[in-house]
Each structure stands twice: as C-alpha cells, then as structure tokens.
C-alpha cells in the first residue's frame, strides 16, 4: 500500500476529473524551503501548487487532490488535464570554488556527487534518489490506473511541439526551452516497462 501524507492547508482553483497527463517537475530547492514558499508566497494565496511532492527520502505529500487543479502552468487548459508531481531536487548547480562544493541558484550548498552534462546553459545537476524514483513510480502507477492515463512517456526532457496533446507522462521541460525540470540526471528508462 502506498503511503501518502496529506497536507490540508492548500486550496485548489477548480475541479477537473478529465486528466490526460502526469507532469513531472522539481522543486529547485530543498523540501522545507519549497513548502515554505508554497505556504507563504503571494501573502499565503499561492495558486501555483503541485498535486504531489516527493522528498529525497521518497516520502509522498499530497498538496491538492488529484481531481482538482491549480495555476501551476501558465495555460489553464494544461492545468486542468494534468496531475503534477514535483520531486525535491536542487536542479542545476554551479561550483563554489571557495568551499570545494556546489551551490544552486539560491545558494543552497550541495556536497555530494553531481551529474555532469551540458544542457540549457548549465553543466552540473543534483541527481534524483532511488527512493524518490521508486515512490514516484508507484504513485504514477496508481494515478494512471485511477484516471485511465496511458503509461507512456515522451522519454526525454527536451521541448516537444504540441506536447499538450500527448496523453501520458511528461516533464515541464517538454513544454518550453527554458525549464530545467526534470534535469538530465533523470533516467527515463524507468518508464520503458510501464506500458
């Protein structure tokens, strides 16, 4: 049985049971700071909410019900058809030569192994954890069954024209050329056996 931690302080924008996509994103900061930003950004009226967040330990947090939507993406129709799963991840990193470590865009320090690949103007990335991937995989299985979403994935993290028409598993970076989530450290091979 999949354990999901319910967080009840957030309000969705509306309801939509006609879900066609699982949209994968990441936090670009640590879990605690991300939750703080969800709670207090825009004076506590943040409407850019994911449905689920999965922390580095694989714990799943339900922010809003999956049959609802928020204003996470800029286009309302994208939000209505998507279930958004956000993975805790610092995203792109840069070297901090003074401390022989790495930092992200807001200065969070990172001292573990990095994934190296030049992509969208950055070279170093925080890897996703096995615990996260395992939890995400189980959650996707459950949501695809519940909402009859095909267990198909684009299979990469680059922009795809007319991605909004795809039924299956996508990433935020499939929607535009500026997003860096999911980052190149994500292994899309996990979706090969989900069909």
Image (spheres, helix red, strand yellow):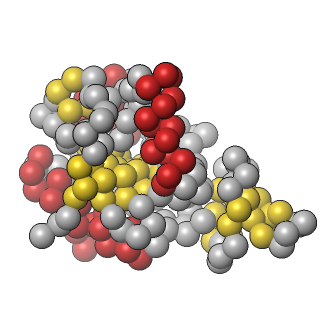
Q: Is residue 130 left or right of residue 109?
A: left
Residue 63 vs 183, above or below: the answer is above
Q: Is residue 91 visible?
A: yes
In percent of width and height, residue 18 lies at 14, 34
In percent of width and height, residue 165 lies at 29, 36
In which quadrant will I find the N terminus? bottom left
Q: Is residue 150 left or right of residue 160?
A: left
Q: Is residue 189 visible?
A: no
Furthest residue in direction right, as rendered: 98
Tell which of 186 and 84 is nearer to you: 84
Tell which of 158 and 18 is nearer to you: 18
Q: Is residue 146 left or right of residue 121?
A: left
Residue sitting at x 36%, y 41%: 50
Q: Quadrant of residue 30?
A: bottom right
Q: Quadrant of residue 117?
A: bottom right
Residue sitting at x 80%, y 64%: 95
Residue sitting at x 20%, y 64%: 3
Tell which of 21 and 164 is nearer to you: 21
Residue 96 vs 8, above or below: the answer is below
In percent of width and height, residue 53 lies at 36, 52
In which quadrant will I find the C terminus? bottom left
In percent of width and height, residue 36 lies at 49, 41
Tally of numbered tags:
0
Tell which of 104 and 185 is nearer to you: 104
Residue sitting at x 12%, y 34%: 17
Q: Is residue 193 left or right of residue 23?
A: left
């Amino acid at each position: 049985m999949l354990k999901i931690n319910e967080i009840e302080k957030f309000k969705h924008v509306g309801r939509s049971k006609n879900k066609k996509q699982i949209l994968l994103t990441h936090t670009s900061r640590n879990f605690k700071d991300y939750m703080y930003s969800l709670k207090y950004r825009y004076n506590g009226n943040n409407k850019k909410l994911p449905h689920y967040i999965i922390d580095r330990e694989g714990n799943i947090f339900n922010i809003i019900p999956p049959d609802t939507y928020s204003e996470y993406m800029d286009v309302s129709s994208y939000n209505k058809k998507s279930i958004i799963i956000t993975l805790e991840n610092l995203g792109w990193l840069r070297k901090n030569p003074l401390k022989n470590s790495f930092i992200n865009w807001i200065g969070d320090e990172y001292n573990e192994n990095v994934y190296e690949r030049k992509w969208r103007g950055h070279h170093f990335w925080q890897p996703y954890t096995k615990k996260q991937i395992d939890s995400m995989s189980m959650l996707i299985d459950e949501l695809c069954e519940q909402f009859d979403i095909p267990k198909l994935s684009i299979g990469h993290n680059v922009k795809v024209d007319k991605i909004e028409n795809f039924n299956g598993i996508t990433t935020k970076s499939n929607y535009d050329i500026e997003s860096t989530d999911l980052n190149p450290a994500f292994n899309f091979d996990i979706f090969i056996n989900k069909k």
